């Protein structure tokens, strides 16, 4: 289990005091100094990656990422005093998760997850790795 206690001079209002990867590597828990705490699955973090590969360079370029139900976090790499890079076992490693990004992903979980599931259905895609592209 990877864990870190983080405490430096904050660069945002959302400052984590702990980031802990779950033992099964399928999620993280991040706690903030104001008492907020979020448990986020690796799948959710992967499909909502802040990377250009997923988010594109405009909202119209955003990609729906199927087949990530089983994805795991391999590594967490600090990026300065403001973020971490998550390395996933599907080799995705380009997203830099700032403290504000974690806060947003936690606060907007229900809305974003619902939208993601709707996008998968509209594109006839699946969360399952073997059935990422459903067949008729």
Image (cartoon, rainbow, N blue to C red):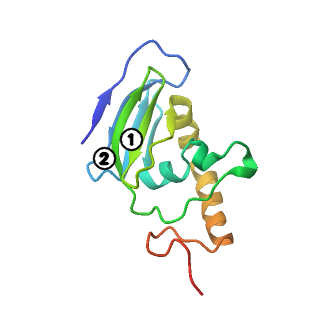
Give whichever of discs 2 and 1 has the lower sequence position: 2
Residue behind mark 2 = 22
Cα–Cα span, label 2 and label 1: 7 Å
- Residue 128 rendering spot, x and y as whole percentages: 46, 70
Residue at image location 56% in from the left, 30% down from the top: 100
Task: From this view, report whether residue 101 is shown above or below residue 131.
Answer: above
User: Residue 86's quadrant in the figure?
Assistant: top left
- Residue 74 rendering spot, x and y as whole percentages: 32, 47
Residue at image location 28% in from the left, 53% down from the top: 24
Q: Which label belongs to residue 29? A: 1
Left or right of 50 in this view: 93: left
The answer to whether marks 2 and 1 mark residues whose Cβ atoms lie closer than 8 Å is yes
Q: In which quarter of the image is the C terminus?
A: bottom right
Task: From this view, report whether residue 121 is shown above or below residue 18.
Answer: below
> Dot 1 lies on which element?
strand
> Dot 2 lies on which element?
loop
Left or right of 20 in this view: 58: right
Q: Quadrant of the N terminus?
A: top left
Task: From this view, report whether residue 121 is shown above or below residue 68.
Answer: below
């Amino acid at each position: 289990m990877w864990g870190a206690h983080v405490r430096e001079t904050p660069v945002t209002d959302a400052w984590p005091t702990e980031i802990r990867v779950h033992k099964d590597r399928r999620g993280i828990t991040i706690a903030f100094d104001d008492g907020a705490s979020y448990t986020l699955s690796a799948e959710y973090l992967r499909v909502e990656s802040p990377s250009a590969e997923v988010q594109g360079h405009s909202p119209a370029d955003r990609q729906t990422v199927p087949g990530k139900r089983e994805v795991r976090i391999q590594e967490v790499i600090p990026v300065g005093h403001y973020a971490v890079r998550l390395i996933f076992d599907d080799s995705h490693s380009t997203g830099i998760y700032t403290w504000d990004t974690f806060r947003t992903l936690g606060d907007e979980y229900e809305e974003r997850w619902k939208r993601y599931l709707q996008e998968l259905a509209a594109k006839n895609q699946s969360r399952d790795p073997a059935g990422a592209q459903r067949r008729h």
